[in-house]
Image: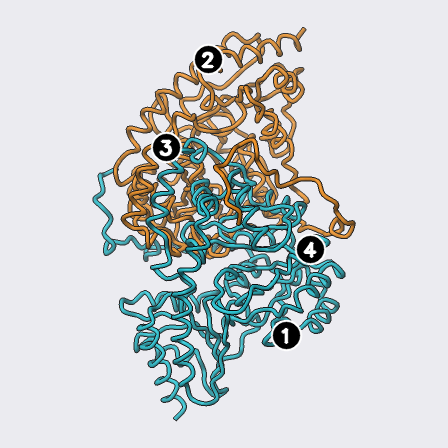
Chain colours: A orange, B cyan
Amino acid sequence: MHHLPRYVPEKVFFIFRESDFTMKLDELKYASRFDNVSGSAIREIFKLIAKPGMISFAGGNPAKSALPDDVCAQIAKEVLQQDGKAILQYGATEGYAPLLESLRAYAEEALGCKVDGILPTTGSTQAMDLLCKALINPGDVILVENPTFLGNMQCMRLYEANLVPVESDDGGIIIEKLEEAIIKHKPKILYTIPTFQNPTGKTLAADRRQPIAELAAKYGVVVAEDDPYRDLRYSGTALPSIKSYDKEGWVMFLGSFSKIISPGLRVGYMAGDPRILRKCTVGKQSADVHTSNLTQAIVDQFLRRNLLPEHIRTICASYKEQMDAMMEELATFPAGTTYTKPEGGLFIWVELPEHLNALELMSKCVERGVAYVPGTHFFAEGGHDNTLRLNFSNSTVEQIHTGMAVIREVIAEASK
Amino acid sequence: MHHLPRYVPEKVFFIFRESDFTMKLDELKYASRFDNVSGSAIREIFKLIAKPGMISFAGGNPAKSALPDDVCAQIAKEVLQQDGKAILQYGATEGYAPLLESLRAYAEEALGCKVDGILPTTGSTQAMDLLCKALINPGDVILVENPTFLGNMQCMRLYEANLVPVESDDGGIIIEKLEEAIIKHKPKILYTIPTFQNPTGKTLAADRRQPIAELAAKYGVVVAEDDPYRDLRYSGTALPSIKSYDKEGWVMFLGSFSKIISPGLRVGYMAGDPRILRKCTVGKQSADVHTSNLTQAIVDQFLRRNLLPEHIRTICASYKEQMDAMMEELATFPAGTTYTKPEGGLFIWVELPEHLNALELMSKCVERGVAYVPGTHFFAEGGHDNTLRLNFSNSTVEQIHTGMAVIREVIAEASK
């Protein structure tokens, strides 16, 4: 090939450019699993926020300052020098052996219980995908929180699952409603984000955790306990995982290093019963053979060198200031606006007065350089047009003050 | 967590250990896509070859000496120092922008044609998975070579595709048989490995490449042109890709850096029509969001610094010697044994006299410290018990002489 100069961002090659399509390929019929998936609304937002100078409360990205580039540079070099031949060779689908050891110790401390099996995955997104692959036939029911993480809703829909929302309150899923829904819908999976939930920031109450594990075992429902924000706690005390109450093996814990080390490395994991993990492992063989050994080795060194506690303390201190700034601004919003007061995580959930439409307001905000995600996208059945999700981790305190003032003004104008 | 010492291999944590299972979870019903998948035979082989001192002709691993650990260590450090904040942040599902540029230039030279769209994937295994995700409903037909790569057969089976073999000869797929099969079975996909095929080492004849592209367009069949061995040519001249004859967009080219840089990094790509790639990209969003930016950046630097041509020359020189040593040994095998004479790649395909069973012989070989893969595993419909696949890339010339002598002895004893 021609020798290429150093990459210059302005010269980005856009892969989906126009060209002369013949009719014939347009007649190609795609798999029916795509009939249920559009996902375009959120992508439009991400296109908008790519504009320079935009203040984005839309993503779930870590702060730039929270990404340990120098440490990773050093670790990447060292692991390749010390174990490069093994790292660059094919690895086991079951995971990079050193990481399996350090991850188990980390996970057992995080979950507060013994871990029977553990599978490193290409981000925890892949863990959800593999769990659906192992369990879901078209039409099978997955119970979800209402609202819930839209990325994983797309995953479930691509497996043609039937998503049924369960009623929640400020303490998360309501146990009585959950049991009713289980009896009525015979779900295969309950999907829950118990800590600093995406999108609401709410945390499942301590006294609802054991009952969920018990209902799962009573009725034979696999619980996908998706807990990527667990370590980002700014106040209050850590609660036991649902998994820690699991006696029968029905709870699969999905963990991630995306929010506490780096999302770009794509390393997550699934911890739980070895029989379910075995199916997921066979599914992973033909999904990507194994997660990159290099990124697994980097995470292993973070754990093995015990770098996480101090790193987490640093980023939590900063995220707390950012969240406090956003809460401070929200306190000045017009009456009728309510919002969650999370003890950690990345998101605040806002409910505007009912007559306001967060989709419509967003285009006005975007015109003035501020973006968020309208809440309706997080509901399995849509609606809730007066809600929105705000992220504070990827904006400076100054940007938060400026951006929230814009949203407040746009709301005030719409309320006239 | 407790501070862990440096990892010691003997202390490997085996994740699938015995524990007290309750009855209840054993009643869990997995998704029916697993009804078609066993895949255990090949895994048993890989367990056997883990024994120290085993000479393995079983895998498809690059030689240890072919893995550029020092270069990767240097590059990994540099890219993280120079673009670490972008590499460690969430990336686009569509790929790391610098790689999109360098990969396009590389692919256009490799394929000998313009490339409309390109999608980096987590190994080319993921490319096959995404293509099935985009196109395959349960029961849809995929035409496959007979024999073909067993890993991708497992992928297709997990999408509940109906695998139909097409007859081949020494020049690869027979065009008349292909057209017959297309008319009879109305396949969604034709899966072919045109260059130094896995497992046979055969190469699709030059004059069959354009006809395949034309039949694809005539009948509306997507061709998955899986070409990971293309650059490993030890004699003869490179042939044009099927993709280079594709006027209508029906050919999707699957490329990989596993055999020419490193399989442990997990970077491959799919090149072809942007409309099909778009569906694959939506499928990838919920599969792993994006391929690790770090491993994409490392491959980008290999391309951008033009390191591949010299690296490929070096490994090809070594692989040629290894292949020649294996061919030399095969020439001394008893009459009635036939084998392919590849111009490149990683594999030689052996047919023993019909009364011999390569599965039975393998356990005798393994007892004496030599492993291979029985050929039956590569046939969609099984059978062909007298065939076997030999890999030469992951053994030294000395190991090849020793190991082939063992196989020859075992055959001689069984022939008595």
Q: Measured along the vertical axis of the image, is residue A383 above or below residue A241?
A: above
Distance between mark 3 and mark 1 Cα atoms:
53 Å
Q: Name the residue under label 1.
A: B167
Q: Extreme right residue here?
A: A23
Task: Name the mark on residue B250.
Answer: 4
Q: Kindly check if marks 3 and 2 are in contact, taking CB atoms under 8 A apart as contact.
A: no
State the residue position of label 3.
A69
Of A144 and B192, the residue lying toward us: B192
Label 4: chain? B
Q: Is residue A145 above or below residue B403?
A: above
- The residue type indicated by label 3 comes to Asp
Question: Label 3 vs label 2: CA separation?
Answer: 24 Å
Query: Badge 2 is on which residue?
Result: A398
Which of the image's four quarters has the C terminus of chain B? bottom left
C-alpha distance separating marks 1 and 4: 21 Å
Whether labels 3 and 4 share one chain? no
- For discs 3 and 2, the disc positioned in front in the rendered view: 3
Q: Is mark 1 on a helix, strand or loop?
A: loop
Q: In front here: A142 or A185?
A: A142
Image location (x, y in percent) of residue B364: 35, 80
- Type of amino acid at the residue the image marks with label 1: Glu
**Of discs 3 and 1, which sits in the foreground?**
3
Instruction: Give me the C-alpha separation between circle 2 and circle 1.
Output: 68 Å
Q: Are marks 1 and 4 on the same chain?
A: yes
Q: Does label 1 lie on the same chain as label 2?
A: no
Q: Kindly identify the amino acid type of the residue bearing the numbered disc 2.
A: Glu
